[in-house]
Image: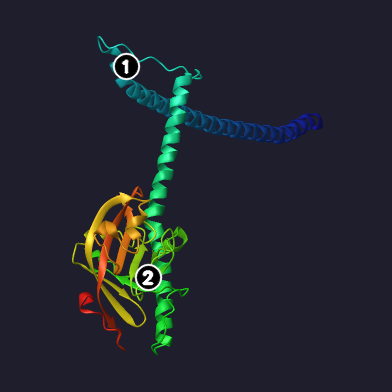
């Protein structure tokens, strides 16, 4: 009986040992399966990411291809008119200009002289603007300042007395209604240094001018016609019988134009002689002569207007002008 029970016990113990081994193998199989599934999932994820990257790359390539196609289409459209022009029957294609080809000496010379002409034209235009506009602006400012100075001098010495005709500011004011340019300050001398200030000047050479207060003589004046104030610009508006008035500190001298010489040589000094015989007068008198350049914008000749004193009027406290200026 004992012998029969031992194998059964060993068999039972062996069965008990086999059960844990089977459980271990089952666990290992499960872990292997889980690892396989995790690996497959990872590989699947990587494959998906690779697929998405491939799709993005394909999309970019497609867009680049599309843009290149559009650019080629635009170039083709731009070149199409040229192709059509070249394809016109009977019209030869325009020759292509060779770059770097040396220019002919004549072409270089023409280009150079053309640039010189353009530059010269610009300089000439600026000079005209300066001569006919800017010099007028400067001269008007100067003459206005000098006129104000002489009138202040007169106002500060109201008591009648000797008149300083050769004062540094001027000797008085010329009024010619026909010229429509207001009063003109008169100073000593006819040089450009004097006349460029927008004033008139009385001659000191080649013939010495008389002054208004002299008993006889020719009060001979000059002024610019254009530029630098152009005070005698409208001298051609003066007619025979028109008034010419000269104003001093204490006297109005009223002259009347009686002769006009529209053109004479710039060297004709007889026009300003004490007795201006070219005006038709033969005897001494109290004359006034206005001279300026002619034609307009040139200095080739001289324009002359002669006048003769009609009367004088004393200046009152209000400096009331004579009837010719009212």
Residue at the spot x=23%, y=75% of the render?
325
Tell me if label 1 and label 2 are in contact, CB under 8 Å.
no
Q: Is residue 238 left or right of residue 146?
A: left
**Residue 125 visible at all:** yes
Instruction: Using residue 165 as the reference point, say whether residue 37 is left or right of it.
Output: right
User: Which image quarter holds the N terminus?
Assistant: top right
Q: Is residue 108 left or right of residue 177?
A: right
Rendered location of residue 93, percent (x, y): 33, 13
Colour setup of the view: rainbow
As drawn, which residue projects farthest toward the front?
A: 283
User: Quadrant where the C terminus lies?
Assistant: bottom left
SS class of the residue under badge 1?
A: helix
Tag of residue 83: 1
Pinpoint residue 122: horizontal percent, then vertical percent.
41, 43
At x 25%, y 59%, the residue is 279
> Which comes before the other along the chain, label 1 or label 2?
1
28, 154: nearer the viewer? 154
Instruction: Note whether 162 is above or below 146 in the view shown.
Output: below
Q: Which mark is residue 255?
A: none
Q: How many marks?
A: 2
Residue 185 is marked as 2
Between the C-alphas of marks 1 and 2, the distance is 77 Å
**Residue at the spot 47% in from the left edge and 27% down from the top edge:** 61
> For numbered disc 2, what is the local secondary structure?
strand
State the residue in front, 63 or 307. 307
Taking depth in this image into account, of 241 and 158 the one nearest to the observer is: 241
The crowd level at tag 2 (other Cα within 10 Å; few <14, some 14-19, many 20+) is: many
Q: Is residue 282 shown left or right of residue 224?
A: left
Judging depth in this view, the residue of 289 and 54 nearest the camera is 289
């Amino acid at each position: 009986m004992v012998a029969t029970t031992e194998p059964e016990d060993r068999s039972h113990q062996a069965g008990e040992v086999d059960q844990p081994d089977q459980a271990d193998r089952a666990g290992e199989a499960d872990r292997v399966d889980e690892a396989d599934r995790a690996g497959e999932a990872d590989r699947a994820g990587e494959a998906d990411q690779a697929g998405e990257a491939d799709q993005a790359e394909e999309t970019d390539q497609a867009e680049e291809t599309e843009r290149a196609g559009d650019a080629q289409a635009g170039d083709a459209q731009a070149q199409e008119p040229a192709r059509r022009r070249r394809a016109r029957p009977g019209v030869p294609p325009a020759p292509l200009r060779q770059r770097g080809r040396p220019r002919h000496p004549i072409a270089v010379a023409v280009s150079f002289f053309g640039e010189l002409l353009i530059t010269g034209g610009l300089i000439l235009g600026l000079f005209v603007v300066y001569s006919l506009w800017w010099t007028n602006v400067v001269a008007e400012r100067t003459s206005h300042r000098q006129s104000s100075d002489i009138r202040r001098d007169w106002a500060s010495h109201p008591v009648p007395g000797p008149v300083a005709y050769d004062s540094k500011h001027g000797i008085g004011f010329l009024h010619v209604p026909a010229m429509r340019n207001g009063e003109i300050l008169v100073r000593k001398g006819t040089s450009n240094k004097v006349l460029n200030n927008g004033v008139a000047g009385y001659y000191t050479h080649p013939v010495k001018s008389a002054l208004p207060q002299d008993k006889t003589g020719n009060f001979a004046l000059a002024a610019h016609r254009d530029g630098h104030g152009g005070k005698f610009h409208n001298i051609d508006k003066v007619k025979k019988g028109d008034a010419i008035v000269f104003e001093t500190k204490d006297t109005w001298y009223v002259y009347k134009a009686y002769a006009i010489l529209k053109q004479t040589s710039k060297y004709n000094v007889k026009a300003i002689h004490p007795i201006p015989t070219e005006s038709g007068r033969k005897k001494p008198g109290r004359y006034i002569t206005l001279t300026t350049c002619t034609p307009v914008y040139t200095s080739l000749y001289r324009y002359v207007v002669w006048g003769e004193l009609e009367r004088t009027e004393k200046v009152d406290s209000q400096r009331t002008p004579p009837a010719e200026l009212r």
